[in-house]
Image (cartoon, rainbow, N blue to C red):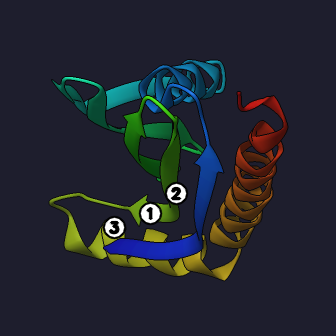
């Protein structure tokens, strides 16, 4: 059994003198909340203009069978006048129960879906709210 549900999605656009440095700072701050896995980290420059992409995810185990996954993609553009950083955050709740014993899995699924999954999902929602608040408040610290 596998369940995957998008809990929250958020998009922000912030002004940043150096969008790439800002994106790296945001990723570093996320790393304080858990293990960050970098999917893409690119800086392209063409004279006074530069473009950047920083794409990563953060996973947090909620219990043995479920986890929270926050995927963050940041695209930056800058020139001599300044820049902007576009932040896209998607937070999902994932639950997976696997075994070769179909009878055991079926019984456990019924039990897990009747109660423990609600607690894990509530924990995921609370953590997602915290992560969104973190991203929104970061606008205060942008350069």
Q: Which badge, 3 or 2, is on the more N-terminal residue? A: 2
The answer to which quarter of the image holds residue 103 is bottom left
Residue 113 sits in quarter: bottom right
Q: Is 95 located above or below residue 26 in the figure?
A: below
Check disc 3 and report the residue beneath it.
104
- Label 1 vs label 3: CA separation? 17 Å
Q: What element carries label 2?
A: strand
Counting other residues with Cα less than 10 Å from the Cα at mark 2, is it few (<14), some (14-19), or many (20 or more)? Answer: some
Taking 62 as reference, is 93 left or right?
left
Q: Are marks 2 and 1 in contact (CB under 8 Å)?
A: no
Residue at the spot 77% in from the left edge and 51% down from the top edge: 136
Residue 27's place in the image compared with 118, above or below, is above
Q: Position of residue 40 (x, y in %)?
A: 22, 34
Quarter placement of the C terminus: top right
Q: Which of 47 and 58 is in front in this view?
A: 47
Q: Which x, y percent locates residue 100?
A: 15, 60
Mark 1 vs mark 3: in front: 1
Return the residue nearer the eye: 72 or 59. 72
Which callout, 2 or 1, points at the residue further toward the start of the chain?
Answer: 2
Element type at mark 1: strand
Quarter in which the N terminus is drawn: bottom left
Q: Which residue does the image show at 35% across and 61% down from the upper left?
A: 97
Residue at the disc numbered 2: 89
| Residue behind mark 1 | 95
């Amino acid at each position: 059994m596998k369940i995957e549900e998008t809990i929250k999605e958020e998009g922000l656009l912030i002004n940043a003198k150096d969008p790439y440095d800002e994106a790296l700072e945001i990723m570093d701050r996320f790393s304080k909340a858990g293990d960050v896995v970098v999917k893409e980290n690119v800086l392209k420059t063409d004279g006074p203009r530069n473009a950047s992409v920083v794409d990563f995810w953060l996973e947090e185990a909620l219990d043995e069978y479920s986890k929270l996954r926050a995927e963050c993609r940041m695209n930056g553009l800058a020139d001599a006048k300044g820049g902007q950083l576009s932040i896209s955050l998607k937070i999902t709740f994932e639950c997976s129960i696997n075994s070769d014993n179909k009878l055991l899995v079926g019984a456990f699924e019924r039990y897990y879906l009747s109660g423990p999954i609600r607690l894990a999902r509530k924990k995921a929602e609370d953590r997602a709210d915290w992560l969104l608040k973190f991203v929104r408040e970061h606008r205060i610290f942008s350069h």
